[in-house]
């Protein structure tokens, strides 16, 4: 530490001047004591220091520190500048007191000062130490990028007390970008000891080794001599150009243990010289024998006696134009810019993503503009309704019995599939009215043999109810019984399609039925509803149960086609199906067994 400057005491004009006792005192009684004049204590004065703050050093020789790849060069340049100022003790590590060090390697710590009672000399020594520490801090902070600079806390806290030294700054930066303990040193050593030259890129291989050695060389967890030299030679190409160097290193450790006959820096420079000579020969005489041998070894299993053709060498030449990373083996970058662990820019991926946030993209599927065949709609004759259609059920004009607890659903159009505006049933037993063929939405025709009312029995929340389907068409060509759900929703019936179950909620217009639901079971994307069809009696008589008429459909031709599947002949099952082209869902109804 530099010697502290001498203190010069200068009397301040504001300092109190102690006057002698006054010759005249006021009279007092003889028995009273004479009052004693006591001078007030001197007020604290601000002493003037003779310490002169030195000039700050020039930082042009220090590169910027922005990532882990810049640490080695930045740390080396910073140490040179701090050594030149003679303030290395401000960043020296604090070791146990029993460790003997060089006199210039002992750490310098801030002097202890009693803030309530201190002398001017102690204050000058305290200020001088912090002024020197500010110089070292200036060297450390002068060439930091925005991200490393954000890691450093301010010098003073909210009360103005110093809270970090230059040694603390270097420790924070070493923890983030360098080697700071045995664990971080082991990571660097393991990553570099397993490297090999990939694609003949010896330059990147040497750069990676030099950076790793410099990272741990100034710490307490350095490589051993064997690891630095012999393991470096093990990763060089197995070609005749590098064979003399590898033999020299291997025999040197056998004859001169434990350090060998050549240092790491000499071995790495010799490898670069060999690579430079190989490139010079390749530029003047074409590909060297080493490159031709590696190319010919790839095509060695050829059966012909002709020499390898020129195209077999061209891929090697074209690949040499792109650098290959010796850390991860990928093309397009070198080890100094590699983002993978062990590379020179491990934090580069985070910086790139922070600077270039991903933008949301919408994946749009565009169908090809294929010509579609024109749809020709045929006009089929309408079904002639009989004046008095024969019915096996009692007429609706007949007087009804008192209405039970359940109210009738409003008489709306009948559910339909996209083939027609009526329900389709394959069984003729429930029907009574014959009809002519009916046109469908896909320009086809279906033969209908009957038209009429169909009833089935359902259990709604434990109560048996009879449901009536109006205007049902008997079409034996339809492989399965179908009824639409889309038009049911238009009439305020709500269907909820969930996993493994489909719920049918009756409309709110029937107050007594709003709490009732019809549940269907989902099997392979089809909703099955078990029904019990009520067959018409042989002799029309009054039924003791008033039926519930399902909402009927408006007589509209749908705009979509629902492909028919294989017939489902399971008795007593109704199926809800979802069309692939429209949100219409269909009921697939099968009559129950008559047994």
Image (tube, rainbow, N blue to C red):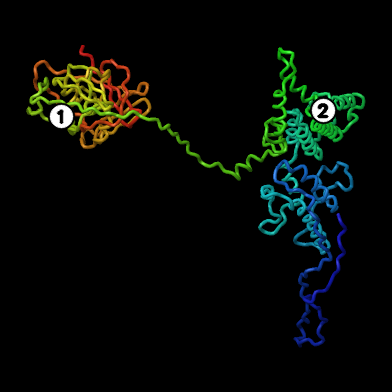
Decide: few, some or many residues near mark 2? Use Cα within 10 Å; few <14, some 14-19, many ≥20. many
Left or right: residue 295 versus residue 474 is: right
The one of 198 and 151 positioned closer to us in this rendering: 198
Decide: few, some or many residues near mark 1? Use Cα within 10 Å; few <14, some 14-19, many ≥20. few
Residue bearing mark 2: 233
Left or right: residue 567 versus residue 209 is: left
Quarter of the image with the C terminus is: top left
Cα–Cα gap, marks 1 and 2: 98 Å
Residue 44 drawn at (x, y percent)? 77, 69
Question: Going 14% across and 26% down the picture, which residue do you hit?
Answer: 546
Quadrant of residue 127 within the rendered picture: bottom right
Above or below: residue 165 compared with residue 318 = below
Above or below: residue 559 compared with residue 109 = above
The one of 4 and 432 positioned closer to us in this rendering: 432
Quadrant of residue 550 within the rendered picture: top left
* Residue at the outermost right position: 255
Q: Is residue 417 among the parts visible in the rendering?
A: no
Q: Earlier in the sequence, mark 1 or mark 2?
A: 2
Above or below: residue 426 compared with residue 364 = above
Quarter of the image with the N terminus is: bottom right
Left or right: residue 535 versus residue 302 is: left
Badge 1 element: loop
Residue 198 drawn at (x, y percent)? 73, 28
Residue bearing mark 1: 404
């Amino acid at each position: 530490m530099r010697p502290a400057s001498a203190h010069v005491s200068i009397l301040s004009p504001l300092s109190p001047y102690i006057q002698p006792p006054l010759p005249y005192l006021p009279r007092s009684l003889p028995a009273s004591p004479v009052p004693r004049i006591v001078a007030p204590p001197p007020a604290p004065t601000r002493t003037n220091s003779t310490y002169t703050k030195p000039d700050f050093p020039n930082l042009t020789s220090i590169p910027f520190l922005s990532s882990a790849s810049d640490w080695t060069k930045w740390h080396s340049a910073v140490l040179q500048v701090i050594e030149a100022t003679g303030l290395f003790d401000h960043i020296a590590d604090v070791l146990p007191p029993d460790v003997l060090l060089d006199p210039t390697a002992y750490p310098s710590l801030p002097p202890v000062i009693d803030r309530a009672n201190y002398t001017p000399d102690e204050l000058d020594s305290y200020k001088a130490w912090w002024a020197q520490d500010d110089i070292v801090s200036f060297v450390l902070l002068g060439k930091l990028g925005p991200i490393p600079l954000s890691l450093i806390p301010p010098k003073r806290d909210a009360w103005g007390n110093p809270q970090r030294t230059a040694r603390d700054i270097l420790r924070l930066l070493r923890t983030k970008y360098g080697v700071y303990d045995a664990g971080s040193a082991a990571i660097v050593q393991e990553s570099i000891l397993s490297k090999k030259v990939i694609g003949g890129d010896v330059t990147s291989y040497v750069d990676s080794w030099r950076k790793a050695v410099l990272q741990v060389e100034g710490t307490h967890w350095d490589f051993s001599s064997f690891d630095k030299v012999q393991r470096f030679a093990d990763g060089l190409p197995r070609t005749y150009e590098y064979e003399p160097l590898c033999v020299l290193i291997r025999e040197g450790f056998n004859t001169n243990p434990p350090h060998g006959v050549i240092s790491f820096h000499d071995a790495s420079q010799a490898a670069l010289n060999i690579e430079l000579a190989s490139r010079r020969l390749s530029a003047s005489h074409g590909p060297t024998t080493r490159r031709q041998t590696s190319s010919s070894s790839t095509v060695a299993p050829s059966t012909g006696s002709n020499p390898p053709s020129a195209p077999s060498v061209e891929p090697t030449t074209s690949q040499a134009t792109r650098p290959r990373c010796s850390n991860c083996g990928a093309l397009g970058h070198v080890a100094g810019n590699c983002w993978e662990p062990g590379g020179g820019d491990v934090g580069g991926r985070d910086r790139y993503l922070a600077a270039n946030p991903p933008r949301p993209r919408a994946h749009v599927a565009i169908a090809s503009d294929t010509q579609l065949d024109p749809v020709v709609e045929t006009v089929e004759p309408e079904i002639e309704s009989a004046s008095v259609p024969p019915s096996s059920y009692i007429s609706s004009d007949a007087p009804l019995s008192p209405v039970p607890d359940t109210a009738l659903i409003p008489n709306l159009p009948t559910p339909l599939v996209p083939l027609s505006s009526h329900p389709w049933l394959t069984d003729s037993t429930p029907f009574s009215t014959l009809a002519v063929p009916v046109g469908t939405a896909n320009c086809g025709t279906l033969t209908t043999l009957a038209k009429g009312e169909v009833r089935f029995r359902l259990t709604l929340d434990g109560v048996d109810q009879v449901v009536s389907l109006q205007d049902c068409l008997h079409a034996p060509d339809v492989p399965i019984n179908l009824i639409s759900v889309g038009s049911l929703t238009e009439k305020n019936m709500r269907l909820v399609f969930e996993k493994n179950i489909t719920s049918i909620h009756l409309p709110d217009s029937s107050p007594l039925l709003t709490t009732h639901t019809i549940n269907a079971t989902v099997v392979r994307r089809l909703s099955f509803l078990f029904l019990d069809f009520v067959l018409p009696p042989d002799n029309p008589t009054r039924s003791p149960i008033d039926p519930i008429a399902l909402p009927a459909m408006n007589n509209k031709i749908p705009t979509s086609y629902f492909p028919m599947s294989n017939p489902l002949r399971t008795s007593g099952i109704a199926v809800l199906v979802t069309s692939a082209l429209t949100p219409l869902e269909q009921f697939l109804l099968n009559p129950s067994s008559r047994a």
